[in-house]
Image: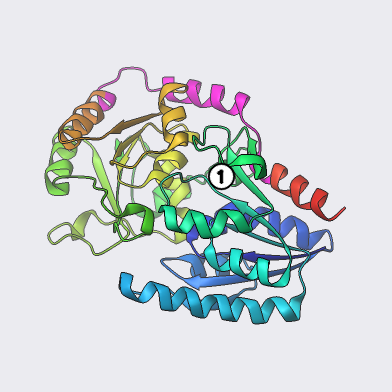
Amino acid sequence: MRILFDLTHPAHVHLFRHAIDDLSASGAKTLVTSREKDVTVDLLDYYNIPHRVLSSKSKRMSGMLGEWSLRGIRLLQLTYSFKPDIIVSRFNPASAFVSTVVNCEFLLFDDTETKPAVLRSITYPCADRIYTPCSFYRNLGSKQRRYDGYHELAYLHPNRFNADPNVLRNLGISRDETLVFVRLVSWDAPHDIGQSGFDDVVDAIKQLEDAGATVLLSTEGDLPIGLESYEVTVPVHEVHDLLYYSDLFIGESATMAIESAVLGTPAIFISSISAGVIKELSERYGLVYQFDGPNKHTLGLEKALEILRMSDPSVWQQRRSKLLNDKIDTTSFLLQEMRNTVM
């Protein structure tokens, strides 16, 4: 098997890294192409996954078209020389374009329903199969393959992840402290346009501190002025350990809200973004609480403080156990599908 993985975001690294390791160990030939965005390259380097950087995230939306055009050309050149049997990526217009030009099987993994319509119209038709969680609320037609899991269970399923308590010791944090992980996003991704989160993160942190919590702040963009003392600095691969040991997540990141939930940490999602996975984690498992609308900031913090006052926090691990009984190890599913494609 010859498989090309095109990874353009840190979440893509996590989704596919165990599959890449397994395939390489079993003798398959893999080629990983990457993008300078956030900690994508840092993660690939940490996990010792060889890769080729094809582009860097543009700082302006106006430069994105140029970046993706250049990325498509470079990816096409590599594809001609590598000659893959399969191209694999999350939602990715460059991979879609290249797979069509070289007539290669393209497996697309998606869990975000709010992509701009123009990007969906040029990407989905190029895929041979589109894999989505069962909770994905869009019907994508005959190419769609639903599976009973989440992207995050490719790397946070108990088969793949064991939390390391040293992350707390290295930060000088006691296991007895009440930890709240706060995450801000930059709102510059295509699916974030027109969306919003916290009204006032300074107010949010003050209320959480007044409730006795130790606040750990992580941000995708620039750190708000005056909040430097709250910023948590851990190696990129330790963030999930920190989420596991937190008592609460509250933030604007859908991915981190889902990650927290599957780890058994209740999540408050302050965002106007609609997502099927978030809806299922809320309604079926009670592990995520999403707040939208003009009062989302106030209502989200009220729920956060209510959770921190709970007398029996073991309820979250009980809900996580139910989730894990229902869901699959996503990496095992990915491997089966890729191997079946070339058989």
Dot 1 alpha-carbon crowd within 10 angstroms: few under 14, some 14 to 19, many 20 or more: many
Does residue 237 appear in this view?
A: no
Residue 92 is situated, as x and y percent measured from the top left of the image, at: 54, 61
Residue at the spot 44% in from the left edge and 77% down from the top edge: 67
Residue 21 quadrant: bottom right
Query: Which is nearer the eye, 56 or 140?
Result: 140
Whether residue 281 sits left or right of residue 87 in the image: it is left
Query: Which is nearer the eye, 175 or 120?
Result: 120
- Label 1 amino acid? His
Looking at the image, which residue sits at the far top?
A: 311
User: Main structural element of the magenta stretch: helix, strand or loop?
Assistant: helix
Magenta residue check for 248: no
Magenta stretch in the rendered image: 307-331
Residue 37 quadrant: bottom left
Whether residue 254 sits left or right of residue 215 in the image: it is right
Residue 269 quadrant: top left
Relative to 285, does residue 130 appear above or below in the rendering?
Answer: below
Residue 101 is situated, as x and y percent measured from the top left of the image, at: 67, 72
Does residue 301 appear in this view?
A: yes
Q: Secondary structure at mark 1?
A: helix
Query: Which is nearer the eye, 133 or 44?
Result: 133
Residue 266 is situated, as x and y percent measured from the top left of the image, at: 38, 31
Magenta residue check for 327: yes
Q: How is the image coloured?
A: rainbow
Residue at the spot 47% in from the left edge and 21% down from the top edge: 284
Residue 9 is situated, as x and y percent measured from the top left of the image, at: 48, 62
Residue at the spot 48% in from the left edge and 22% down from the top edge: 319
Q: Quadrant of the N terminus?
A: bottom right
Instruction: State the residue position of label 1.
Output: 151
Residue at the spot 46% in from the left edge and 42% down from the top edge: 259
